[in-house]
Amino acid sequence: MGVNIRDIAISNEIEIGILHGKTIAIDALNTIYQFLSIIRDRMTGEPLKDSEGNVTSHLSGLFYRTSRILGAGITPVFVFDGKPPDFKKKVQQERRRIREEARVKWQKAVEEGDAEKVRLYSQQVSDVTSDMLEESKRLLEAMGVQCIQAPSEGEAQAAFLNRKGLVYACGSQDWDSLLFGAPRLVRNITISGKRKLPRKETYVNVNPHMIDLEKMLGSLGINQEQLVLLGILTGTDYNPGGIHGFGPKKALEMVRQHKSLREIKEKIEWKFETPIETIFDFFINPPAEESRIEKTRMDAEKVKQILVGEHRFSEERVSGILEKLDSSLESRKQSSLSSFF
C-alpha cells in the first residue's frame, strides 16, 4: 500500500526515548493492517482469535504496542480514514481480488506444510472490517488515547495536523504522509523492538526512523510538488505500479530535469483512468479539517472489560501491563510536578 520511496528517502535511526513528551499522529488503518498481517500463528497463518472465533490480532497489537508507546512518554493520536476519493474504488476492488488469490495460495501452502509460503500468503489476506475499526477505537479511547476521524485519507489528515504544529510528527509504515506535506514522518514506531528475519532463526532490533521532509527535499534537490510527481511516477494508491520502468531513482532524475506537471505529462504515457492532474491535486490539496488535540484519561476497568471480559485475554497479563503503565504515568506526573515547584 502507498508510495515506495525507500531507496531515496533520507532517514535517521533514532531511539524511541527521543520522542518522549512528543505527540505523534498515527495512521490507524495502516497500523491495524500491520497487526493483522504479522500477529498470526506461525504454522497455520491464522490470526489470533478468541474462544468465540473473533479475530483479536489487531486488539493484541494495539494494546501491547500502544502501552509501550505510552510508557515511553509519547502521546499517540490515532487518525482513522474517512471516505476515500471516488477514484480509489477500482484500486480497492483490485486489492480484494489479490487478497482472494492469496487466500487460495495460503490454503494450498497449509496443505503442503510450506511454513514460509504460509507466512507469506497469510499476510496478504488481511482485511479490516468496520467492526474491527469500531472495537479498535473503543479500546484506544479506553486507554486514554484520542481517536480522530479524517474526512478522507487518514494520512492526509495526520499530515495536516503536523503542518499545523498540533502534533510533532506522523507515524506510519507508508511514505504517503510526506507526499501530503507532513514535516516529519516516524516509521517503525508501532513495531520497534525485536523482529525475526524472514526464513532465518535470527532476531534484529528494530528502532524508529525519522524523516525530516525539509532536509530530505534539500538533500534530493527537489521541492514538494516534485516529490508528489516522483511518487506518481513510481506509483501511489491511486495509480498502482506507476509508470512502467520508473523506480525511485529514475523518477528522481526525471523530476529534476522536468520540474512541472505539464513537462512530466509530455514525457510519459499515462494509461490510468484517473487523470494525472486529479491525483496530483489530491496530494497537494487533500481533504482535511481542523481538529483539537485533547488529553484524556485511561479507564483501566473498561480496558479489562474489552480485552478480558469480551475477548478472554489473560487477566493477569492485561492487569500487569495496566499496572506498569499506570505506575509509569504517575511517576512522570510526579516528576513534572516536582520540577514545577
Image: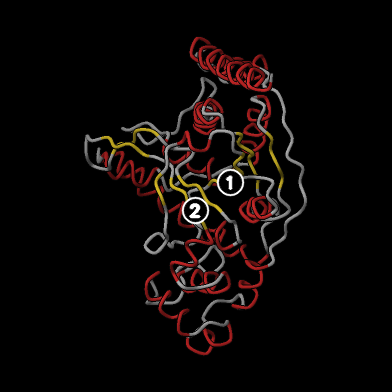
205 relative to 296 in the view: left or right: left
Q: Quadrant of residue 79?
A: top right
Does 221 sit above or below residue 294? Answer: below
Q: Are marks 1 and 2 in contact (CB under 8 Å)?
A: yes
196 relative to 164 in the view: left or right: left
The image's mark for residue 174 is 2
Which residue is painted at 39% across and 64% down in the image?
8
Q: Residue at the far bottom: name it.
A: 266
The percent coordinates of residue 7 (x first, y second) are 37, 62
Q: Secondary structure at mark 2?
A: loop
199 relative to 282 in the view: left or right: left
Does 325 sit above or below residue 85? Answer: above
Residue type, label 1: Asp
Is residue 311 or residue 238 the one in the foreground? 238
Is residue 81 or residue 207 the one in the foreground? 207
Q: Residue at the far top: name it.
A: 316
Q: Would you call the spot at circle 2 few (<14 residues within 10 Å), some (14-19), or many (20 or more)? A: many
Residue type, label 2: Asp
Which residue position holds label 1? 27
Is residue 208 or residue 239 the one in the foreground? 208
Q: Secondary structure at mark 1?
A: strand
Q: Residue at the far front: name it.
A: 341
Q: Quadrant of residue 26?
A: top right
Which residue is painted at 54% across and 72% down in the image?
223
